[in-house]
């Protein structure tokens, strides 16, 4: 497939980029600093400004799917959604956050007393982004939330998928950037969560 990846040089973005390249997809890797994007097969690095809707839409045009892997506090969901819609690309997948996942019905992780203050602004903006997507009548979107601990690790290909509830195991709630990338690319290749949020964890 031909896929545009916004935020291709970040922690999650760089792992998604490698997973896409390893599976033979053709990727336009977009970042503020394209020189930070590694040279990989079938990857074309380009500079992008997520706050320039028209220029971003022009870069996205012609792809089969767009992935957004940018921090919520460093972007504007309205602009990103508008750029995707203006580009005419059929599918939009978002690297989501864990804060909006539920600990119990109607009780979000971000609302718990132990949620780290340092991550609260990012988590609130991520939750607002998800709400915004759910109000889009026509956009074919998917929002993939990681587990509570989202860190560098190994690509095992072994994980669980869930819906709106936080996944927790005996070892806590975690997923590696590498396995998150596997789950996201699986969803691109075999869509099972169209116009839905889902989550991945061990």
Image: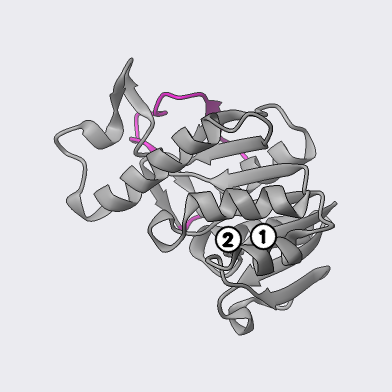
Which is nearer the eye, 158 or 47? 47
Is residue 99 depicted above or below 176 in this figure? Answer: above
The answer to whether marks 1 and 2 mark residues whose Cβ atoms lie closer than 8 Å is: yes
Which is nearer the eye, 174 or 13? 13
Instruction: Report the magenta residues as a range.
Output: 152-173
Looking at the picture, the colour scheme in use is one colour
Is residue 50 depicted above or below 200 in this figure? Answer: below
Q: Which residue is farthest left? A: 113
Answer with left or right where residue 76 lies relative to residue 136. left
**Could you give the CA–CA distance between mark 1 and mark 2, rounded to whole angstroms?**
7 Å
The dominant secondary structure in magenta is loop
Which is nearer the eye, 10 or 49? 49
Q: Quadrant of residue 24?
A: bottom right
Answer with left or right where residue 162 lies relative to residue 174. right
Read off the residue under disc 1: 5
Read off the residue under disc 2: 13
Q: Secondary structure at mark 2?
A: helix
Answer with left or right where residue 182 lies relative to residue 63. left
Q: Residues within 10 Å of mark 1 (few under 14, many from 20)?
A: many
Q: Residues within 10 Å of mark 2 (few under 14, many from 20)?
A: many
Please state the horizontal and vertical placement of residue 32, each as a whole percent of the image. 56, 76
Disc nearer the start of the sequence (1/2): 1
Q: Which residue is farthest top? A: 105
Instruction: Name which residue lies at 57% across and 71% down.
Output: 49
Q: Quadrant of residue 123?
A: top left
Closest to the camera, between mark 1 and mark 2, is 1
Answer with left or right where residue 168 lies relative to residue 64. left
Magenta stretch holds residue 70: no
Please state the horizontal and vertical placement of residue 67, each as a whole percent of the image. 65, 52
Q: Secondary structure at mark 1?
A: strand
Q: Check residue 57 in the rendering and tell me which mark sits there, or answer none.
A: none
Please state the horizontal and vertical placement of residue 95, each as a whole percent of the image. 53, 48
């Amino acid at each position: 497939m031909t896929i545009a990846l916004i935020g291709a040089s970040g922690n999650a973005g760089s792992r998604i980029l490698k997973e896409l390249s390893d599976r033979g997809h053709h990727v336009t890797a977009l970042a503020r600093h394209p020189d930070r994007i590694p040279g990989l097969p079938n990857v074309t690095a380009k500079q992008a400004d997520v706050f320039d809707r028209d220029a971003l839409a022009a870069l996205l045009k012609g792809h089969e799917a767009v992935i957004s892997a940018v921090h919520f506090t460093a972007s504007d969901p309205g602009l990103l959604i508008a750029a995707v819609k203006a580009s005419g690309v059929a599918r939009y997948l978002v690297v989501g956050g864990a804060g909006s996942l539920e600990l119990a019905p109607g009780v979000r992780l971000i609302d718990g007393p132990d949620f780290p203050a340092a991550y609260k602004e990012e988590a609130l903006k991520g939750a607002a982004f998800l709400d915004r997507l759910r109000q889009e009548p026509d956009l074919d979107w998917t929002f993939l939330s990681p587990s509570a601990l989202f860190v560098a690790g190994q690509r095992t290909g072994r994980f669980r998928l869930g819906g709106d509830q936080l996944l927790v195991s005996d070892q806590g709630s975690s997923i590696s950037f590498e396995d998150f990338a596997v789950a996201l690319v699986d969803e691109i290749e075999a869509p099972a969560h169209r116009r839905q949020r889902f989550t991945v964890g061990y």
